[in-house]
Image (cartoon, rainbow, N blue to C red):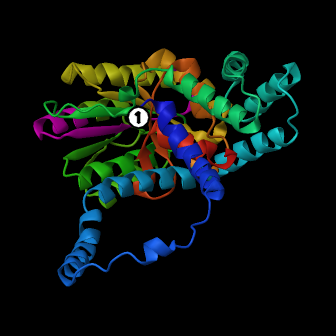
Amino acid sequence: MGLFEKIKQSLFNNSADADKNEQKPAETEASPDEEKSPEPSADKQEDDKTAETAAPAVKEQEPKASETEDDQQDQLYEQGLAKTSSSFGSKLNAFFANFRTVDEDFFDDLEELLIESDVGVETAEKLTEQLKQDAKLNKAKTKAELQATIVQGLVQIYAAGGATEREKLAYDPDQHPNVYLFVGVNGSGKTTTIGKLATRFKKAGKKVMLAAADTFRAGAVEQLQSWGEQAGVPVVTGPDQADPAAVVYDACEQAKAGGYDYLLVDTAGRLQNKVNLMNELAKIQRTIKKLLPDQPAETLLVLDGSTGQNALLQAKDFDKTTKLTGLVLTKLDGSSKGGVVLAIRSEMKLPVKLVGLGEHADQLADFDAKAYAVGLFHDLV
């Protein structure tokens, strides 16, 4: 089943089932012939009772576990994207409330609405043009048909960004350590993301080490050390104002010697001094490769999802120097700008690997395109 089919099933089946239930005729009373059917024998009644008591135990077995896990994931996204869904959904619902006919004005207004929803100008233009063609081919005229066509168009734009396998965090069990380099501007949530991820990996039984390479921001090292204490993992630090690359070199040596599974590296993010920052990050990457030629396994740009289109601009800036492998979008639970995922995916073809959907460690979720789309479009249908 394709991505859109899964989303369509989650979003539209409930309303379709409800319509079917409304149309379903009420049950009629049993006919006289049915009432006069012979009583089952005593042995048959006993067998039926045994089957009735045994059946529920069978129905409650394994299938429930996976369903519950999927439901929990969808619920996490639904709650975390509530503000985005409410904003995006209410705008589209208001748009459709005034819907009269599919004409050029309809598509002009839709394009403007999509831009306002932070999906990006390029993405909005691409989607609107695509929807024009789809509306003609599918003869989508009713509100429900148009809504489904819009959702499908947005999903297709996301899926065009590449295989969903790239959304998974890279991990090679034969590599010790797997190095994750976290980059991003100050305040984007890098250190918090590292702390949450360290907690997750530690609970999974992995050996984790942190490297405090943000040596210039006041309190940065102490913040990472606090997360290390909470997660129960070591943190490699250097003296005040130490060379970040030197700290990373020490961390790589220790993680390699200790057979660690993961080394998570925190870095500086002073964008006001962009040239120096980019040079520093490039030096850190070269330092990692001196000791660990196949690393880093991931170079993740952490973006504050509440900044909307600014997040897209930051992604383009960092990608020029650091050869990003993926993105982490934080603070989506407190923002109505979750649509920026579509803009970044469409314009940069970079996979989103993690999303921050709340303050707790277990609310840093692996990115799930289906759950994201269901959460984003929840208030639309």
Please report the residue visible at 86 percent of the width from the left and 19 percent of the height from the top. 104
Residue drawn at point x = 19 percent, y = 52 percent: 205
Q: Amino acid at mark 1?
A: Phe
Residue appearing at x 31%, y 49% in the figure: 198
Q: Quadrant of the N terminus?
A: top left
The answer to whether any part of residue 244 appears in the image is yes
Q: Is residue 275 above or below residue 354?
A: above
Q: Nearer the viewer, residue 265 or 246?
A: 265
Depth order, front residue of 189/272: 189
Answer left or right for 125 relative to 62. right
| Image side of residue 335 versus residue 102, left or right | left
In the image, the segment drawn in magenta is 250-275
* Percent of width and height locating residue 358: 51, 55
Residue at 57 percent across and 23 percent down: it is 157
In this view of the protein, can residue 187 be seen by the observer?
A: no
Report the front residue among 32 and 3: 32
Total numbered labels: 1
Residue 295 occupies quadrant: top left
Side of 121 relative to 30 (left or right): right
The x and y percentages for residue 131 are 69, 21
Q: Is residue 195 above or below residue 321?
A: below
Question: Can residue 66 be found in the magenta stretch?
Answer: no
Q: Residue beneath label 1, please?
A: 182
> x, y percentage for residue 7?
52, 39
The location of residue 23, given as percent across then percent down, is 65, 54
- Relative to 126, say whether 327 is above or below: below
